[in-house]
Image (cartoon, rainbow, N blue to C red):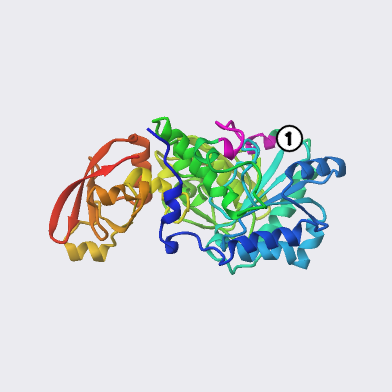
Amino acid sequence: MKALHLLPFLFLPAALLAETVKDREGAVRNDKATLENDPRWNYNDIDAGFRLAKTTGKPLLVVLRCVPCMSCAGIDASVLQEKELVPLLDQFVCVRIINANALDLVRFQFDYDLSFSAMVFNGDGTIYGRYGSWLHQKDPLNKTTASFRKALEAALAVHQGYPANKAALQGKQGGPTPYKTPVEFPTLAAKYQSKLDWNGKVVGSCVHCHMVGDAFRAHYRSQNKPVPVEWIYPQPSLEVLGATLATDDVARVETVAPGTPAAGAGLQAGDFITEFHGQPLISMADVSWVLHRAPASGTLLAKVSRGGETHELRLTLPPAWRNKSDIGRRVGTWPMRAMAFGGMKMDDLDDAGRAQLGLGKEQMALKIAHVGQYGEHALAKKAGFQKDDIILEVGDLTTRMTESALIGHLLLSNLPGEKIPAVVLRGQQRLTLELPQQ
């Protein structure tokens, strides 16, 4: 099967995508004009950053920012302008990257769905940790830097312990990838070069970070293979195991849900997770990285600080634990909706809506909120699906599940070209349609 094209994704309704600035070209060019000669920020040159980190002995901070995207605009502005951060930033070699075209994908593995991320390295290339914030991703006006500040402080502590702690950092390093850089993926190679086109339309020449995740998934799909589960549910939060982390700290437990793996392990509100699966942490993103690379089953060791004492806790990974991730707001989920649903977006019908229609609380009832109109996102429309239809059955699946769980089931179990019987409720009529897989 041909690779899933990324172009139709651009034609989705603007309200369903991440909000962008009005003058995208101007924003990118202004960013360059402002920062390319900045005494602190090395602009778009990672190699120069590594060379300087080696010669100075400072850790390397690489900030990856999608300038046209409004998400994370607040924290981005604070990182560039907040005077209180200056003493911390002065202890790093700072690099600002605004495109993913030439990223070394073995070195730069992080949450590609975020529009502001950061990675900290030793000058020899060893990764100290990752930073990313969904709190800021969802609120472009949020300028708070508490979590970023604490991540930098924690990274400096890791740097001070290097190289004696190098063995503990092994799990933070990236794994093998099918291509060295994003523009080598077939879905991106036809349109993008390794460098930005500053003499033309620079935004159109930019590989955005989310396109990297899209390209990985399309790579497997184009080979007629199931998408690996870690690419369907990338960088999970600790919520999948029952614990919520505070958004203003490195890894401080805020709540623990009863009856969950986190509760079973003995994790408590107020605990500070200092190490996870043997890795020192600098932020919540480091926790997500451990879960991203975690096995399908087994246990993960967490070292926590509680009341001045250190405790070792083991979190058991239950079957299909990743499937509890809510990927509904990830921009990378849209191409997966094309793969699994032919371009539809669905919402689980609430109990009140179910009662009104005489549907049980435990049966499948996914209401179609959007049906795509173009390219691969229009296959569901061509198959007869309509907005406000309620999907009651997909193949042999009839029990209640979220859209996120259904995406995972279909991409793990079915291949491009297959058509799966689906029962939908339209008004008072039940129809059987075929759900196309791409």
Front-lying residue, 423 or 98: 98
**Occupied quadrant, residue 328:** bottom left
| Residue at the image position 82 percent from the left and 56 percent from the top | 90
Q: Which residue is mark 1?
A: 166
Q: Is residue 174 magenta?
A: yes
Question: Which residue is at the far front?
Answer: 199
10 Å crowding of disc 1: few (<14), some (14-19), many (20+): some
Give the quadrant of residue 320.
top left
Left or right relative to 123: residue 362? left
Q: Quadrant of residue 271?
A: bottom right
Residue 152 at what x, y percent from top left? 73, 54
Identity, as a three-letter code, of the amino acid under mark 1 = Lys
Q: Position of residue 307 (x, y in %)?
A: 65, 55
Position of the C terminus by quadrant: top left
| Residue 275 within the segment the image draws in magenta | no
Q: Which residues are magenta?
A: 168-184
Residue 211, percent from left and from top: 52, 46
The structure residue drawn at horizontal position 59% and vertical position 54%, both measured from the top left corner, is 203
